[in-house]
Amino acid sequence: MFTTSVVGSFSRPKFLIDAFDGHSKGAVTDEQLEEAIQDAIKLTVKEEEICGLDVITDGEQRRASFVSFVGQKVKGFKLVHVTELNRDALEIMKKEKAQLTYWRAVAVERIQDSLLALDELKFTKHITSKPVKVTLPSPYLVMWEAWHAERSKEIYPHPEDMAKDYSKVLREEILRLKDAGASFIQLDEPMLGDLVEATEGKPDRYRRVIELIHGQKYRGFKEELNVAKELINDSIKGISGVRIGMHMDRWPNKDSPFFGVGYERLLPDVLDIKVKQFVLEYASEGSGDPAKFAESLNDRELGLGVVRVMDKTVEEPDVIVKRAERVAKFLDPEQIWLNPDCGFAPGMYRSFPRRIAFSKLASMVAAAKKMRDKYS
Ligand SMILES: [Zn+2]
């Protein structure tokens, strides 16, 4: 009941960021960087254990960002700085109030099967006996993030074809992770979450920015949902024996007419995506009422965001209990998982104090205990 977990990333300790920076300048060797990464993962895993979380991650310490790391790992993608894609990229992001990661994985050759996160899982399993969640960039996200009208067009004239090839790689990787003992595989799909703020005729602010920087065109609300559904289902169809979830967030914007509206906007189509668990941002202001989504879930699970990742106030357990109870009427306690809204540091340079992140998680675990006492 009320299983506790995290969405994925944690802020990197300063020594790790220094090691990455030093490595890019040639002052830190591969071996020294690897040691810093392993130390950072051990530290993160230990802190998650101390907090008392049920299902843990490695904090994505090895990744430059939750999505652009496909450029570090998968053959066919290349990491390109956003200003190389569009000279005005930084101004565009500022104007539209939609921040993309600066280092972008762009498809420049045919995408080939590659290991994405198997090394991460093996290392984490080696240092903990807790169940481990592995996060992977979802194919619909990658379609929007990694296709570029000029750079990708010779190999992939259409973004959908690139995403289909990536989806095949993802499927192979999910099978490998399952065989290696992953407990939970989470597909990260913030682009689908952002669709909450789009209409049939007008894209949300993230798609607008990517239209301007990458040259991809918005397909309309219904068709975007269709494309997402097909790509994600292709990568997971027929796979059993491991829990598969999908994470959506959108970091609500006060200027949007959809501030205060939740993922119920994506119903009922989003339920055609055959994941067991929906891991959703619902603690942040403006993210809407989770009951409106939970009441349609039937036998699926909800990974409910009950801790804010944008604000540094550590929530009291009773505040978290109140957030969790918003869905208690619609779901069994076994279907409700508790997690923060998002990773604490989806990109390497996003700084969120580690000790505050871990205090928030400890508070969440205390809240779960209260809920278990109450509902058992
Ligand atoms: Zn997120």
Image: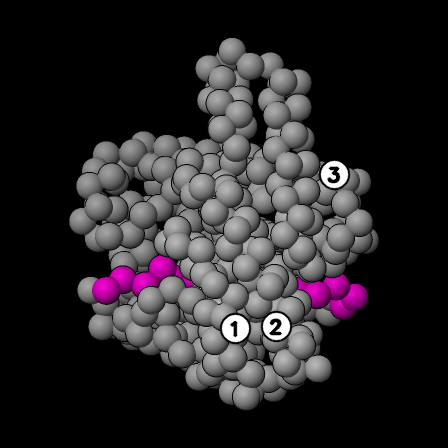
Residue drawn at x 60%, y 14% is 29
Is the residue under label 3 in contact with that under label 1 (CB below 8 Å)? Answer: no
In this rendering, does residue 293 appear at all? Answer: no
Q: Secondary structure at mark 3?
A: helix
Residue 293, horizontal then vertical, whole percent: 47, 81
Residue drawn at x 80%, y 49% is 129
Q: Which residue is mark 3?
A: 123
Q: Which residue is mark 1?
A: 321
Mark 2 and mark 3 lie on one chain; the one further toward the N terminus is 3
Query: Which residues are the magenta region?
Result: 240-254
Residue 371, horizontal then vertical, whole percent: 61, 75
Q: Which residue is mark 2?
A: 370
Q: Disc 2 marks which amino acid? A: Lys
The stretch drawn in magenta includes residue 242: yes
Q: Disc 3 marks which amino acid? A: Phe
Q: Secondary structure at mark 1?
A: helix
Quadrant of image for the C terminus: bottom right
Mark 1 and mark 3 lie on one chain; the one further toward the N terminus is 3
Q: From the viewer's perspective, is 7 left or right of 197?
A: right
**Disc 2/disc 1 C-alpha distance (Å):** 8 Å
Residue drawn at x 79%, y 40% is 126
Is the residue under label 1 in contact with that under label 2 (CB below 8 Å)? Answer: yes
Residue drawn at x 50%, y 42% is 354
